[in-house]
Amino acid sequence: MNLDANSDGSISFWLKLGSQPLEEVTFDLLHDGNKFDSVTFTPDDW
């Protein structure tokens, strides 16, 4: 698994599942000021 922070405040997340190609899922961070409260994601194929 590989996590990258993006400049727009989201996090990109790559996984390899078996022989499947890498899938990229972007997390939207919900934050209050500088504190990140939660991470939500809605990948279509899961």
Image (spheres, rainbow, N blue to C red):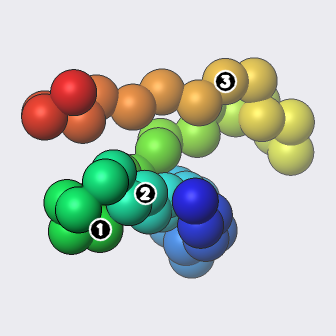
Q: Nearer the viewer, residue 12 or 8?
A: 12
User: Which image quarter is the C terminus in?
Assistant: top left
Q: Position of residue 11 (x, y in %)?
A: 55, 57
Chain-order first, disc 3 or disc 1: 1
Q: Position of residue 24 (x, y in %)?
A: 32, 61
Whether tag 3 and tag 2 are in contact, CB under 8 A, the answer is: no
- Gap between marks 3 and 1 measured at Cα: 24 Å
- Gap between marks 3 and 2 measured at Cα: 20 Å
Q: Quadrant of residue 33?
A: top right
Q: Residue at x 31, y 54 (%)?
A: 18
Q: Residue at x 29, y 68 (%)?
A: 22
| Image side of residue 41 versus residue 21, left or right | right
Q: Which residue is mark 2?
A: 15
Q: Which residue is mark 1?
A: 22
Chain-order first, disc 3 or disc 2: 2
Q: Is residue 29 above or below residue 10?
A: above
Q: The disc labelled 3 sits on which kind of residue?
A: Ser
Q: Which residue is mark 3?
A: 38
Q: Is residue 41 above or below residue 7?
A: above
Q: The disc labelled 1 sits on which kind of residue?
A: Leu
Q: Position of residue 43 (x, y in %)?
A: 24, 35
Chain-order first, disc 2 or disc 1: 2
Query: Circle 3 — which element?
Result: strand
